[in-house]
Image: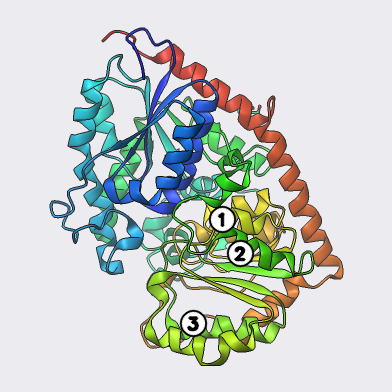
Amino acid sequence: MSSLHDPRAHFILVPLVAQGHAIPMLDMARLLAERGARVSFITTPVNAARIEAIIDQVKESHLPIQFVILPFACAKAGLPDGCESFDLLPSIEYTKAMFEGTRVLQEPLELFLRELRPKPSCLIADMCNPWTMEVARKLRIPRIVFHGPSCFYLLCVHNMAMHGIFERVPDEFEPFLVPDLPCRVEVNKAQALGFATGPEWANFMQEMVVAESTADGIVINSYDDLEPWHIRSYQKAKGKKKVWSIGPLCLCNKDVTRKATRGNKASMDEHIITKWLETMEPGSVIYVNFGSSARTRPSQLIEIGCGLQASNRPFVWVIKGVELTPEIENWLSGGFEESTSSRGLIIRGWAPQMVILSHPAVGGFLTHCGWNSILESISAGVPMMTWPQFSDQFLNEKLIVDELRIGVAVGVKVPMSHVTDDGRVMVQREDVEKAVSRLMDGGENGEDRRMRVRELQEKAMKAMEGGGSSYVNMTRLIQYIMEHTNKEL
Ligand SMILES: *[C@@H]1O[C@H](CO)[C@@H](O)[C@H](O)[C@H]1NC(C)=O
């Protein structure tokens, strides 16, 4: 694919082995390749099998992207065989082992990179892969950190750390204001940090901080017109280190086939889903999907289902494979599916989310507030109902509901990791029903939300087009790397 005299920049992309982290990096790979760079995308056998359709498309498109499948030594990482992605972990207890275990890729990656001639120009690694720091240093390759979350979240975390909030506020549930923001944002530690609050995480967190501070730059999946103040402040906070905002990356998927093949094999053919959506009124359907990693308990799933049923509105509800316990299957087939069959579509497994969100029949999205989902919703002009679960999601909710005012909150206060195992549900069916009607009802507020999200959609498309802010940032990123690459072998 390359010769010694290849003048193109060659980017090595190292995503975290989690679907929510790999999806935007796959988009990034395409964008870089479409802009004339070469890309090597690092993956593992199990993850490569999941994105087979994407790999095939890329081959057909003749984009200069190479998929590099490195062995993932699960046993060495203390993980069960085949656990090469976060959603495959047998239980939440393995989370830390997984974060720390991705280091097993360090050696194979280094071996692969050493063989490359000419030397690659740049390594872009997920912030959760701090071990890439050593690889880049040894091989003397510029390294850029990719941050998956919103810039608002990144800025909040930065400000909280600068003010020592995590040490100062001992109680996980004590509310405090995020410092140095133009608006009032109240959170607690449990919400702001999600799962990684305990002292056992300190080491890994510190590694990520060091890896970021020694990086040559930062890439974020956002765009100027979405959060201008936060992006500017974050850039200021990072001083000399450049911050390129090149999103929403999902907008690189322009046609239906590409929209349909994101992340994993869809469990239901997109044509069946589209056909079903065709039978519904424009803007009438609520789409429900909580992303790839968090697992909803059976009792809570049933409350969601009953809330949707009571709302009397059409819905597409995605239930993950791991959540389909015998209890849930019995409940679904014991009347629920039948009684809602005229207006409800249940997808068991992985859904082609961008295809669904872009369909005119869809008028609202009940989301866990993962940043990819939010960007996909905005890119489709669909307002949201927010149900955060952990990590950046509670702060993302504040951005969506309070600042951008393109969503309504369902009312979740406690992250999943802090919910006690006593069978209590976090959100009652009445609350689901109420939030659905607030979001989907006409009314002035509803109309305003829809108008605002469509404005942001238009601005997102502009940002990604030639001359737009994200397009220009991508140009500058590639230029920067071309100028800073050490050309010698
Ligand atoms: C990204 O684009 C914006 C708007 O054009 C610009 O102000 C900013 O400096 C760019 N960022 C970098 C790192 O070049």
- Percent across and percent down for residue 92 are 31, 68
Image quarter in which the C terminus is found: top left
Q: 297 or 136, which lies in front?
A: 297
Instruction: Determine whether the beta carbon of the residue marked 2 sits less than 8 angstroms from the nearest atom of ligand 1.
Output: no
Q: 72 or 192, which lies in front?
A: 72
486 vs 473, left or right, is left
Q: What element carries label 2?
A: helix
Quadrant of the rendered image holding ligand 1: top right
What residue is drawn where x is 41% and y is 75%? 323
Q: 233 or 399, which lies in front?
A: 399
Q: Residue furthest bottom?
A: 334
Q: As shown in the figure, which amino acid type bears the numbered disc 2?
A: Ile
Q: Mark 1 points at which residue?
A: 373
- Would you identify the image quadrant in which residue 40 lies? top left
Image quarter in which the N terminus is found: top left
Mark nearest the camera among 1 and 2 is 2
User: How far is disc 3 from disc 1 in space, using C-alphas?
Assistant: 21 Å
- Percent across and percent down for residue 381 are 72, 53
Can you tell which mark lies on residue 272?
A: 2
Tell whether label 2 touches label 1 (CB within 8 Å): no
Badge 2 density bin: few <14, some 14–19, many ≥20, Cα 10 Å: few
- Counting residues from the start of the chain, the first of labels 3 and 1 encountered is 3
- Counting residues from the start of the chain, the first of labels 2 and 3 encountered is 2
Can you tell which mark lies on residue 300?
A: 3
Q: Is mark 1 on a helix, strand or loop?
A: helix
Instruction: Determine whether the beta carbon of the residue marked 1 sits less than 8 angstroms from the nearest atom of ligand 1.
Output: no
What residue is drawn where x is 72% and y is 35%? 462
